[in-house]
Amino acid sequence: MPQKITPWEVEGYINYDKLIKEFGVQSLNNLPKEFEKELIFRRGIVFAHRDIQRVLEAKKNKKPFVMMTGLMPTGRFHIGHALIVQQMIFWQKLGAKIYITIADVEAYLSRNQSFEDSRRIAIEEYIKNYIALGLDKKNLEIYFQSERSRDAKKSNAYYKLQNLLARHVTFNEFKGAYGDVTPGKMLASLLQASDMLHPQLPEFEGGPLPVIVPVGIDQDPHLRLARDISKRIKSPEFVQLSSTYNIFMPSLSGGKMSSSDPNSFIALTDSPTDVENKIKRYAFSGGQQTLEEHRKKGGNPIIDVSFQYLRMMFEPDDKKLAKIESDYKSGKLTTGELKEYTIEKINAFLKEHQKKRKLTEKQVNKFLM
Amino acid sequence: MPQKITPWEVEGYINYDKLIKEFGVQSLNNLPKEFEKELIFRRGIVFAHRDIQRVLEAKKNKKPFVMMTGLMPTGRFHIGHALIVQQMIFWQKLGAKIYITIADVEAYLSRNQSFEDSRRIAIEEYIKNYIALGLDKKNLEIYFQSERSRDAKKSNAYYKLQNLLARHVTFNEFKGAYGDVTPGKMLASLLQASDMLHPQLPEFEGGPLPVIVPVGIDQDPHLRLARDISKRIKSPEFVQLSSTYNIFMPSLSGGKMSSSDPNSFIALTDSPTDVENKIKRYAFSGGQQTLEEHRKKGGNPIIDVSFQYLRMMFEPDDKKLAKIESDYKSGKLTTGELKEYTIEKINAFLKEHQKKRKLTEKQVNKFLM
């Protein structure tokens, strides 16, 4: 299968080791023990980084630091999105101030989506799920790219930075990072760079400080560009950005989830029947064609989407996961049984989540500025 | 001499009739009588327009309209700049709401000038002279591009518009308008388009309304681009921009004034001796080489810089100007006499102006937001 990694498109299966080399990022090793308690770090879901040590040092020395990320308010909120939210919550508990940009300007520029639609989708699909998943409104700034703040000093500083960055970058760099580039994508990219860098402005956190940006590896071109630009700027001063990279949550068929195809993902608003149908009908299986063959040869958990969902999110118990893995490999656990267990775990998670989500209606306004 | 007209550079002598054709602008004819009272309109200093009728109709029907222009805060304020200020004051008296952008972002992006320098130069060289020339603080908004407003709603709307415009323009259009283009120039151009269009946003004047932009003809590419972009936007809605075009005030040597060469212009802070020296030594003369020849053949007022200064600004009395013109053509008036008279008129103007300028110190803050 072809492999293509730009922030605009991801296709086929990913060779993460190759990506680490190609992109020049570092493997994540020797993390403090708070990290090892988290499934996403312990199991290599977050697998690489740039300059994470700045943030670890800040944490160690009780200095302030920021975690910055963004959401693209299109499509439905699915379990792949929840991966990033888990990281937000982890960093928030670790003491980071959290910045979340709602990329409505980018949705307008690169996907023709109206600002009204972006607002509605951001609230219904994203913010409510963030709250239900456990994001705290303390130490948090969520904002729209089109409306940075109710404080004019902050808004002016944020957009001034977007403009200022343009002096320190060439067209060839945009082309190198993104391939094809339009004025719209260029503005979106500069605004995204301002998203990542602006917490360090005097008007926000009071000056240079470490900022960690957790992203999928497909977003690295944005990071590299923002890092390259910020290096060249003498005034204002910036601490170089840090970042972590997570692997993709596979779609039901094993590729990348597509928000235009609801049968490619599990949404956090799916009903128990939706989940059952989707896993039974669409989840790619690593098992054998017949029960007889499966008992003899065993299944392959690496390519089995149900197993990967358990590993990446829904089975936090390492011992249970290890037993499932070995039973599946040996053929003792059938595909049908693995799918049943996965359905059960996902539905238990969603039941709890959807109960919490109902309580979020009144909280949304407190989270938005 | 080569002729080159882009917003970044103007060289050589200008053939205005050719420009009217090339740029597709209209000659200014049949203006209401308020305009004929003004030297700059009566004498064709403002010589062409696009869509001025929208503004004239608004004025006639007592509907609101806006005059929008900008200043580049570099170099010293000279009599060429005063031409635009006279237009501002004229439109302000006619009932227009005046918007003036201080292009500090553009100065940063295209001239590497710091925001601090831009602020200082804008105040010392421009705003103080604007006030002394008679600009009223009523019905006026002066703002920095880097800091649109103290009201966050206004700032957000202004910068959102800059971003939004990028979806409706291609790289080829930028290249067509400006020749060479960098990311910095592109951002500056989009921000300038937002400068021209944003008065029509709900957050500013409450909705679509006519906006007139008086510029030198070299700035027309900016206008054309902003007009082309705004035509394509359905939401928010815009009334097409109107514009007027003035001829250039010639430099002392007859070309374009250069802010890096103080001997190319008369600054509004020049002393009487400066003015005397500059006119006597540098002002290009349309007279003959010897007095004898001059008496016989007469001078050429069209290329005579002193005469043009009188025509464009310093001799408002049409009869006196006509007499000077015919006396110069006939050889009755010598170059020395013409220069003496010009020095006298300029110094009388500057004496009055500089007296007023001293009183502006305390008013600056009231003018800036």
Image (spheres, coloured by chain):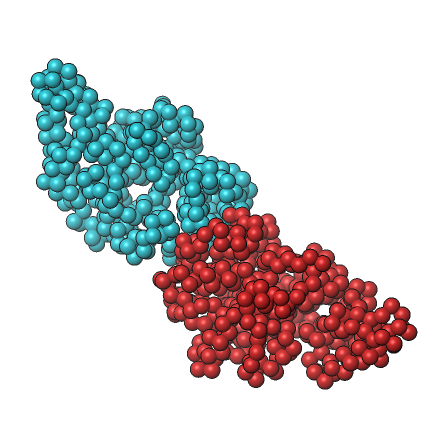
Chain colours: A red, B cyan
**Residue B271 picture location, percent across and down:** 12, 43
Q: Residue at 23% across / 31% down in the picture?
A: B254
Q: Nearer the viewer, residue A350 or A179?
A: A179
**Residue B178 picture location, percent across and down:** 42, 39
Lateral position of residue A304 relative to residue A45, left or right: right
Q: Residue at 35% across / 62% down in the picture?
A: A235
The single residue placed furthest to the top in the displayed view is B296
Residue A324 sits in quarter: bottom right
Q: Residue at 44% across / 59% down in the picture?
A: A229
Residue B47 sits in quarter: top left
Residue B365 visible within the image: yes
Q: Nearer the viewer, residue A221 or B81?
A: A221
- Quadrant of the snapshot with the N terminus of chain A: bottom right
Lateral position of residue A345 relative to residue B166, left or right: right
Residue B241 visible within the image: no
Q: Nearer the viewer, residue B169 or A116?
A: B169
Number of marks? 0
**Residue A225 picture location, percent across and down:** 49, 59
Q: Nearer the viewer, residue A3 or B167?
A: A3
Q: Is residue A324 above or below residue B297?
A: below
Residue B79 sits in quarter: top left
Lateral position of residue B202 relative to residue A270, left or right: left
Q: Residue at 51% across / 62% down in the picture?
A: A224
**Residue A101 picture location, percent across and down:** 53, 63
